Each structure stands twice: as C-alpha cells, then as structure tokens.
Amino acid sequence: MKLKRAKGSSAQDGFARILANTGWLLGGKGVGAVLSLAYLAIVTRTLGVADFGRFALVLSAANVIKALVSFDSWQIVVRYGQPHLAEGNNNALNRVLRFCILIDLASALAGGLIAAAIILLFGNALDLGPGTGLQAWLFCMVMLITIRSSPTGILRLFDRFDSAAFAETMIPVGRMIGAAVALVLSPTISGFLAAWAFAELVCAISYWWLALRVGGDRIGSWRAGQALDARHENPGIIGFLTATNLQTSLSAIGQQVAVLIVGAFVGPTGAGLYRLANQLANSLTKISSLLSRSIFVELSRTQSSHGVHALRALFRRTNRLALIAGAIIIALILTIGHPLLGLIAGKEFLPAYPLLMLLGVSACIDLVGVSYRPLLMATDRTTQSLRITFISTLMLLGTQALLLPLHGTIGAAIANIIASITGFTMMGLATRHALRQRDPVAGEAQDE
C-alpha cells in the first residue's frame, strides 16, 4: 500500500511539474503566437507569394544546415549534469557544460562550410534570385553562431523554465521589431532576413545572460580541468551525443528539406504556400515540442529516483494530456483555420488552406505521441528512437518524391500524414515494449 501511494505521489508530483513547466513555456509561446501573426502578416503582404517563397527557401536552407550540424546539447547537460549536481560536484558539471559549448562551436564552423558549398552548388536550382546567395550565407552563419542549446540545458537543469520562456520570447519580439523596421527602411527579402538574424542574436544573448545568472557558483569553475575530460567522467556521453544529434537532425531536416523539395518541384510560389501552411500548423501544435522538453526532464528524473512504477504512471498521464490537446487543436484548425489564414496573409494565400488542414492533422498525430521519444531516451533506448526517426524521415521524403509529381503540394502534405502515422505506430510499439521489459509483471497484467 505504501509503495502504491509513493508511486502515485511521485507520478503526480512529476506530472504537476510537467504542467507547470509547460505552462511557463506556453506563456512565452503565447506572446510569440500573437506576435507571429503580426510579423507574418507584414512579411507575406509586403513580399507577395513568389518573394515570400524565396524568403522561405532561405529560412529552410538555413534551418536544414543548422539541424544537420547542431546537437541537442541541452539534453546532455540535463542527463549527465543531474548526477554531478546531486553529488555537489559542480566542477564536473562545468566540464560537461564546456564540452557542450565546444561541440556547438565546432558545429557552427562545419555548418558555415556546408552552407557555402550548398549555396554555390545549388543556389540557382533553388531560384533564390540575384545577389541572394551571400545574404543567405550570412544569415546561415548568424543562425549557427547563435546556437543556444547549452544555456538552455542549464536553465532546465535548475528547473528554471520561467527564465527559458522569457529568453525564448526574444525571438518573436525581435522579429516583430525587425519586421517593422524592415517595412519602413528596406521592405525586401534582405531586410526581413536581417530582421530574423537580429532576433536570433537577441535570443542567444538573453539565454546566456539568464543561464549564467541562474547557475552562478552552482555550475562550478570555468578553469577546473579540461572540457574534454567530460568524455571520461561521463561514460556513454559520446554515444548519447551522437544519437541525439542524428535524431534531432533527421526530425528537423525532414520538415525543412520538404520545403526545399516543394520549391524544386513547383517553384517559389508553391514553396511559399507550403511554408506558410506548415508554419501555421506548427504554431497551433507548438505545445508538442514544449511538452516534449518538460516530459524528458521529468521522465529522466523519475526513472533515476522513483523506478519503473512511477515512470509508467507518469507516462500514462502525459499520454492522456497529449490526446486531449490534439483533439482540441484539430477542432481549432477546422473552425478558425480558413479565416485565420485570410486574416494573416490575405486572399492570395487562401489556396494554402487545404495544406493547413493536412499538415495540421500530421502535426497533431505527432502531438498525441509526444511522450514516446522522451520515454525511450530516459530508458536508455536512444538508438532505437533514432532508428524509428530515420525510418519515418525516409518515409516522408520518399512519399513526397512520389506524390509531388502527381498531386503537387497536396501530395507533399499527404506525405507528412503518412510519415507521422508510421512514426507514431513504431514509437508506440517501442515504448510499450520498453515498459514491459522494465516491469514484465505489470506489462502482462496490463495486457490482460
């Protein structure tokens, strides 16, 4: 009886923290959502469909490169920093942090070289327009040097999701200010790229200032040992680092490459419509990524300190929450999606509404399964999660290549649904198997 009560209490506490932390993130994203409607309206109405498509292609190319080379180092800080923090070994925690910073700097250098090669080789194929190549490369470099995953890890390690939410709002605030300035001084693709770059810089500075302020002495001395010592002090860190990088890269690249593929098949206009619909759909389902961040922190903590029973209870609660959220968002897309699209972008972008519906359904499927990947990672099944992500990404790109020539952008959106269903099914089976292996008796009882 005491064990059951303790299990319920720990799961309830963990679920309460997930709700609280997601609430902080949602608060920041709520501000961002309102501002994004405004700056999207400015950009789409100023540039028009074709130039907005070119603008979208530059953003997607930059995001593809960033996703390809960057690491989710915040997960490393949380995963390997927690034991050091609990033991009071602050200098070891600092070495983990410095190790992640080195990885981020190396990835920025590699990304700059990749960006230059892509723009030189494929700039004409993407129809970016004369003189846009250098601007696209400079924008890519800003995106790369403002990688802020390491300070994000510090804030989440100390449960300061409120500070992270504040820093994250600097993106929409910066874009709104930048878009307004660009509208007055330079209402061109170059002007809006500069606005987006300004927002990235402001956000990165905010993250680092808050992380250093929150961490203080608790993150140890910056001169204690070598950063590379973290490899030996934290067994498995390299494997975890590689797997999380590949998984994050595959997920992000699948979405961003999709825009580039659409642009190659149907031109900048089609890419612009697809990008707008995808951005609106993702804005409505932003809770998915926010929940995932909160869930990973709590599942990792619950797994290490409370065991499999509390882990299973917490997992069930988060699944129910995600299912309710997915149903509500589908209803919102069906009821307000069309008028919202017209209000933001104008009548010329209304052909994107069928894309919005299809991409919204795909995003909601991902939302319903938002607990699956964090659970696999928390139970040391990162490689299995990586394999599933790889398969679903291949499914997305492969079905897009098949359906785009037949059905245009609608085919590309349908490909997203097929890939989401594939990933959802495989992740669901994998998490069920993971929980059953950790607690075979409970697994058999659940089956009965």
Image: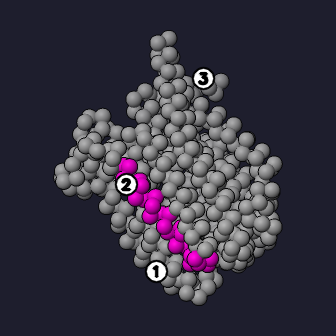
* Kind of residue sitting beneath label 3: Ala
* Residue labelled with disc 2: 208
Q: As drawn, is 140 to the left or to the right of 412?
A: left
User: Vertically, is 320 above or below 151?
Assistant: above
User: Vertically, is 49 above or below 299?
Assistant: below
Q: CA distance from mark 1 to mark 2?
A: 28 Å
What is the magenta range?
A: 185-211
Magenta: main secondary structure equals: helix
Residue 154 drawn at (x, y percent): 37, 46
Q: As drawn, is 228 to the left or to the right of 13?
A: left
* Kind of residue sitting beneath label 2: Trp
Color theme of the render: one colour
* Residue labelled with disc 3: 445
Q: CA distance from mark 3 to mark 2?
A: 48 Å
Helix or strand or loop: what does disc 2 sit on?
Answer: helix
Residue 147 drawn at (x, y percent): 42, 61
| 231 or 207: nearer the viewer | 207
Residue 145 lies in magenta, yes or no? no
